[in-house]
Amino acid sequence: MIVPVLFYIFVVITVIQIIYYFVFSSFLSKNKKENLNTDINQPVSVIICAKNEAKNLEEFLPSILNQKYPDFEVVLINDASSDNTLDVMELFSEKHENIKIINVRNVETFWGNKKYALTLGIKAATHNHLLFTDADCKPVSENWIQEMSAKFSSKKTIILGYGKYTKTNSLVNLFVRFETLITAIQYFSYAKIGIPYMAVGRNLAYQKEDFFNVKGFINHMHIKSGDDDLFIQDAATKENTIICTSKDSYTTSVAPKSFSQWFRQKRRHISTANHYKTTHKLLLGLFFLSKVLFYALGTFLFFFYPWKIILGICLTYYIVQFVVVGLASKKLKEPQIIYFLPFLEIGLILFQLSIFITNLCSKPNHWK
């Protein structure tokens, strides 16, 4: 009796997964034409918060300064670094007049809080249009500012971009890039259908008004992480949010070099999701839970139910998944990932389960 019941549950779970992938396909379609500002080259403040990032600034900051854009400044925030980050910033500012440096010292109330440093940088920014990235990031093109800022309009004031990781020939790099792709597919598609829930600080733009209208990070200043996704939780709506997926709009950064390093990074990110809105947590949770049950029940039923039926259901799932993820990986310039999809998906599930269990036992450290 239990096996037939599990079979019907398996069918429902598979249908739920397929529905999710149809939703995820929404970001593949072109955006409706927006009423863009008449001044397509509006002044932009690029904001980079750095803590002990001297080497990364030396390597990646030139790619920001060499952007082909007529009017932009670069706001460099030294977040109480203990290395020579400030010295590197000052050396660059001697050669570039459009650099503004904000030197943040440790304040006991906001000790080690990136959001405090970012708030000071945002307040000091000259321009209303703000574009954020990290010190270890590099735009893939000289048109990054142009591509991202072109999405600003009278209605759309929050722009979600894509932050890639540089491809290397290692297993951890493959998993990192796969997880980044799947995450991007989700937050792009949800934003496209009017349910924006997160962004990545490596590539995000919004206006000052959006920041001050929600009183900045005040609702989650006590939480060390979440300067990107928790801000989106507060400020983003169906009306004011748009995605940018053009190939010249991406940023790229160096991926974690080991599973342990990546594990620590993702612990912080996943713990932040506990503070999402209930609707967002339910949508994300159902997707993950149904995927876990799909593999668990599918494996069990393959041995205790007519295997041809189970195989047919699984193949239907994989066909839909391969089409959606395949088109998305092509659009976001990650075509190699599709060839390892089942292996990567199962490995990522186990990885995320281990993070969830670890986070239940102890709290992750903050950003630096």
Image (cartoon, rainbow, N blue to C red):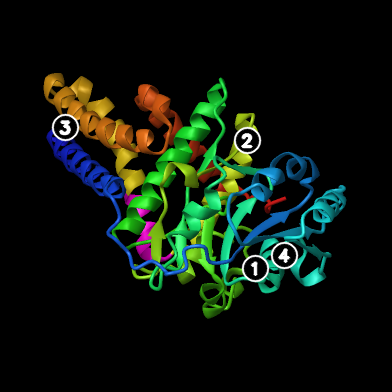
For badge 2, the amino acid type reads: Val
Image quarter hosting the N terminus: top left
In the image, which disc is placed on residue 254?
2
Q: Assess disc 4: are there few (<14), some (14-19) or many (≥20) residues with their C-alpha within 10 Å of its C-alpha.
A: many
Q: Which residue is mark 3?
A: 3
Q: Give left or right: position of 141 versus 53.
A: left
Instruction: Find the distance from the CA under tag 3 to the CA under tag 4.
Output: 56 Å
Q: Which residue is mark 1?
A: 222
Per the image, label 3 sits on a secondary structure element best described as helix
Q: Position of residue 136 (x, y in %)?
A: 67, 43
Q: Main secondary structure of the magenta part?
A: helix
Magenta region = 277-286
> Which residue is at a point 59% across and 58% down the rendered structure image?
70
Q: Assess disc 3: are there few (<14), some (14-19) or many (≥20) residues with their C-alpha within 10 Å of its C-alpha.
A: few
Per the image, label 1 sits on a secondary structure element best described as loop
For badge 1, the amino acid type reads: His
Of callouts 4 and 2, which one flags the residue occurring earlier in the amino acid sequence? 4
For badge 3, the amino acid type reads: Val
Of callouts 3 and 4, which one flags the residue occurring earlier in the amino acid sequence? 3
Per the image, label 4 sits on a secondary structure element best described as helix
Q: Position of residue 182 (x, y in %)?
A: 40, 40
> Which residue is at a point 51% across and 73% down the rendered structure image?
210
Of callouts 2 and 1, which one flags the residue occurring earlier in the amino acid sequence? 1
Per the image, label 2 sits on a secondary structure element best described as loop
Instruction: Find the distance from the CA under tag 1 to the CA under tag 3.
Output: 48 Å
Q: Position of residue 123 (x, y in %)?
A: 67, 74
Q: Which residue is mark 4?
A: 117
Instruction: Find the distance from the CA under tag 4 to the CA under tag 1.
Output: 13 Å
